[in-house]
Amino acid sequence: MFKAEPGSSGHPDILFNCRPEIGLSLFIDGELREPDRDGVAIVGSRKPSLYGIKVAQLCATAAVRNGKTVISGLARGIDTESHRAALKAGGRTIAVLGTGIDVIYPEENVGLADEIRRNGALISQFPPSTPPLRHNFPVRNTTVAKMCSLLILVQASTKSGSLITARLARESGRKVFVVPGQIDDELFSGNHQFLRGCAGDGSVELLTDMSQIDEFFSCKKTIFKDISRIHPSKFEELEKDERAVLDAVRNSGGGMDFDTLSISCGLGPGRLPAVLLSLMMKDIVFEGPGKIYKTSGERS
C-alpha cells in the first residue's frame, strides 16, 4: 500500500491525465498501470435483478475484450458482479472504496478484494481504518466518475447512489451509456429518470448492444489508425521511447504539455526533447499553440 499525493507520478491524475482532475490524496493497494487509462466504470443497484447481473457481466467482458480496465466500487450487486466478470475474462479491475484501504466492505468481498489487488488495485481517498459510513459513499463516487472514460449505468432505482456517479461522470465530460429496462420496473426507474433529464445530450446514450462499447473505443483509436494508414512504415521503425511518447500523446484526449508528457512516459528532460524532435521530423507528432504536443492526425 502507498499514498499518492496529487501531482505525484503514481497518482491517477498524472498517470491517466485526468481532466478534470481528482485532486485528492489517494491510498492505493495494488498497482496502477498505463493500460488502466480509459477505464470503464460499471455501476448500479446493490440488489439487482438477474437481468441486471447478466448485463453487468456482459459489459465487463466487453470492456476487457477492448483491453480496458473495469472500475467499480466493490459494493454488493452490480459492482461485485462487474469486478468478478472482469477477472473471469482475464482482465484488470480497480475498486474505489468508501472505507479506509484496510477496511473491506461488505465483508464477504474480502476474497474478491485480494484478487483485485493482484490484478489491479484498491483505491481509497479515506484514511486507513475509516469504517463504512453512509456519507462516505457519495463522496467516493466522484473518484469513480473521474477515473473512467466511459461509465455504464446498468440498473438503478430513483434512490440509487449510482445516479450520483452517472451525473458526476457526465459533468466531468465522460461518455455515459444507460441500460434500458421495462417501463414498469422500479429497478430501472432511475435509469429512465436519468435519460429523461439528459435528453438531447450527446454524451449520454442508450445502451442496446454490446457492440456500442466496441464502437466507442474504436472511435477513440481513429486518430492512431489514420496515422498508421498514412505512414505504415514509420510505425514499424519506431524505437521504444518513441512508442512510449506517442502512446502518451495519442491517449491524452486533446494533447499534452511537456512536463505532463515527461511524467506520463517516464522520460526526463534530457531525453524527451530528442524523442519529440524525432517524432516531429517523421510527421507523427506536432507542437501546437502553448507547446501542447498532439498527433499529426489532430491538425485542424
Image (cartoon, rainbow, N blue to C red):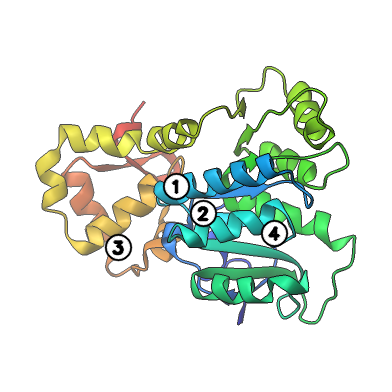
Horizontal side, residue 255 vs residue 236: left or right: right
Please name the residue shown 37% across and 68% down the image.
266
Residue drawn at 60 percent across, 23 percent down: 202
Q: Quickly name the residue at label 1.
A: 252
Q: Amino acid at mark 3?
A: Leu
Q: Amino acid at mark 2?
A: Asn
Of pointers 2 and 1, the one earlier in the residue sequence: 2
Q: Are marks 2 and 1 in contact (CB under 8 Å)?
A: yes
Mark 2 or mark 4, which is nearer the start of the sequence? 2
Q: Is residue 54 above or below residue 130?
A: above
Any mark on residue 272, and which?
3
| Image location of residue 62, percent across then percent down | 47, 44
Q: Which mark is residue 73?
A: 4
Quadrant of the snapshot with the N terminus = bottom right
Q: Residue furthest top?
A: 200
Query: Pointer 2: what residue?
Result: 17
Q: Nearer the viewer, mark 1 or mark 3?
A: 1
